[in-house]
Image (spheres, helix red, strand yellow):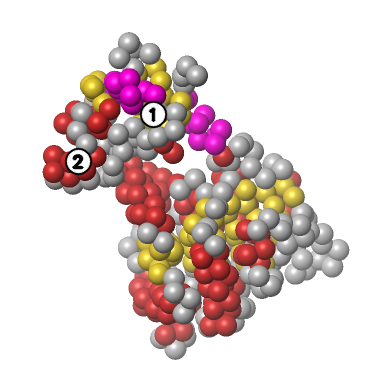
């Protein structure tokens, strides 16, 4: 089972026209539904809201201003989701809309955690998240500005295995293939260098998107630093999503290799960042950390003042450090949860952020005895 983030650009959704291409969208939906039924966890970052809004309004001539783009997004987002919901429903797949901002994914810790929890809950309940930047309310200060970088942020957020950036080009070329007959496609990029960045074109060929090859390079570089492989490929290639997920990468696009192993990248972050507190656990919980999440029932005491989502150190009763992890509850709440069963969390706090004090996926073990 893989966790895959797929970003579809406006040029792909419209098939190079000014209108959403229903046949093209249905083909994308069919491929995602196939992977979904195979057991893969798939997230779709979809452009097209403004194109859908313009289409619904009859393509009026409007200035290219932020309020106009927000208006088109407001009109088009519902239209776009209706199309997706109908098409995925044909394959018995449920979808859920998730609108995010840069503040949700990069600046505000609470919103970051809530976004992660929402996406995890959708995936855990076999629902395909369809994600877009919340253009209707976002302002420049918190705007990411393109769905390429949104998709990379989402991929890092949920610790994805792969990021697929589908566009109207079949990869990165050493020159602009639209203007140079001797342009050559780059098959594999091991490291995003200044030379690779120079190859990227910052122009969108369709005029509908805000991205271009430059933002895809940015996204691929960010994903690589987080241990995630990225592929830039053409959305028109037959069964491109299925083939890439199944490992058929040769000549299907440009592959950007991760610069660190995904697990190592996550572990390095958890170990290297500052610890904001200590959780002391009993002997049973200490042994269970090797393979399981830390549950409240195994916690004996909480030291320090920390917020939900901050990193803490887990120690045994002798004071030996066992692990570092990202907590699901703040220090005050965890102090109230010491020794209780997970089924009692909501009764004690009045709400729940899940059964675990620290989920195993958000924990790095230190020097544990074998």
- Give the side of residue 159 with respect to residue 170, left or right: left
Q: Is residue 196 magenta?
A: no
Q: Residue at x 62, y 52 (%)?
A: 230
Provide the secondary structure element on which disc 2 rests.
helix
Query: Could you tell me what secondary structure mostly forms the magenta stretch?
Result: helix
Q: Residue furthest right?
A: 182
| 177 over 296 or under it: above or below | below
Q: Position of residue 118 (x, y in %)?
A: 34, 54
Q: Position of residue 39 (x, y in %)?
A: 51, 59
Residue 48 appears in the picture as rendered: yes
Between the C-alphas of marks 2 and 1, the distance is: 20 Å
Residue nearer the viewer, 67 or 350 = 350
Q: Residue furthest bottom?
A: 58
Provide the secondary structure element on which disc 1 rests.
helix
Mark nearer the viewer, 2 or 1? 1
Q: Residue at x 44, y 74 (%)?
A: 92
Q: Residue at x 54, y 78 (%)?
A: 26
- Give the side of residue 247 with respect to residue 251, left or right: left
Residue nearer the viewer, 312 or 134 = 312
The residue under label 2 is 345
Q: Does label 2 or label 1 sit earlier along the sequence?
A: 1
| 90 over 179 or under it: above or below | below
Crowd band around label 2 with a 10 angstrom C-alpha radius: few (<14), some (14–19), many (20+): many
- Give the side of residue 209 with respect to residue 298, left or right: right
The residue under label 1 is 288
Q: Residue at x 43, y 77 (%)?
A: 89
Q: Which residues are magenta?
A: 263-287
| 335 over 225 or under it: above or below | above
Identify the image quadrant of residue 213.
Answer: bottom right
How many numbered circles does the render carry? Answer: 2
């Amino acid at each position: 089972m893989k966790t895959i983030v797929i970003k579809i650009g406006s040029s792909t959704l419209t098939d190079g026209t000014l209108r959403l291409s229903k046949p093209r969208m249905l083909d994308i939906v069919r491929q995602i539904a196939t992977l979904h039924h195979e057991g893969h966890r798939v997230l779709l970052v979809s452009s097209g809201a403004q194109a859908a809004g313009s289409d619904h309004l009859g393509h009026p001539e409007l200035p290219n201003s932020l309020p106009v783009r927000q208006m088109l997004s407001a009109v088009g987002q519902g239209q776009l989701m209706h199309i997706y919901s109908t098409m995925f429903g044909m394959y018995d797949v449920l979808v859920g809309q998730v609108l995010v901002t840069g503040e949700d994914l990069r600046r505000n810790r609470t919103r970051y955690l809530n976004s992660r929890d929402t996406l995890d809950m959708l995936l855990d309940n076999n629902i395909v998240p369809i994600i877009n930047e919340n253009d209707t309310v976002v302002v420049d200060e918190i705007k990411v500005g393109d769905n390429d970088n949104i998709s990379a942020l989402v991929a890092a957020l949920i610790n994805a295995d792969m990021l697929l950036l589908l566009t109207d080009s079949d990869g990165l070329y050493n020159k602009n293939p639209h203007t140079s007959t001797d342009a050559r496609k780059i098959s594999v990029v091991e490291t995003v260098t200044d030379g690779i960045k120079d190859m990227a074109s910052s122009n969108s060929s369709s005029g509908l998107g805000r991205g271009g090859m430059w933002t895809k390079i940015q996204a691929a570089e960010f994903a690589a630093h987080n241990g995630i492989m990225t592929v830039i490929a053409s959305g028109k290639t037959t069964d491109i999503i299925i083939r890439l997920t199944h490992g058929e990468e040769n000549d299907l696009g440009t592959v950007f290799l991760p610069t660190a192993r995904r697990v190592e990248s996550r572990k390095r972050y958890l170990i290297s960042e500052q610890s904001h507190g200590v959780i002391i656990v009993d002997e049973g919980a200490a042994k269970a950390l090797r393979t399981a999440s830390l549950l409240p029932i195994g916690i004996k005491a909480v030291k320090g003042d920390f917020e939900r989502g901050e990193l803490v150190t887990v120690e045994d009763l002798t004071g030996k450090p066992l692990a570092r992890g990202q907590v699901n509850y703040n220090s005050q709440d965890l102090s109230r949860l010491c020794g209780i069963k997970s089924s009692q969390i909501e009764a004690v706090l009045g709400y729940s952020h899940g059964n675990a004090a620290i989920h195993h996926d958000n924990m790095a073990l230190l020097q544990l005895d074998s």
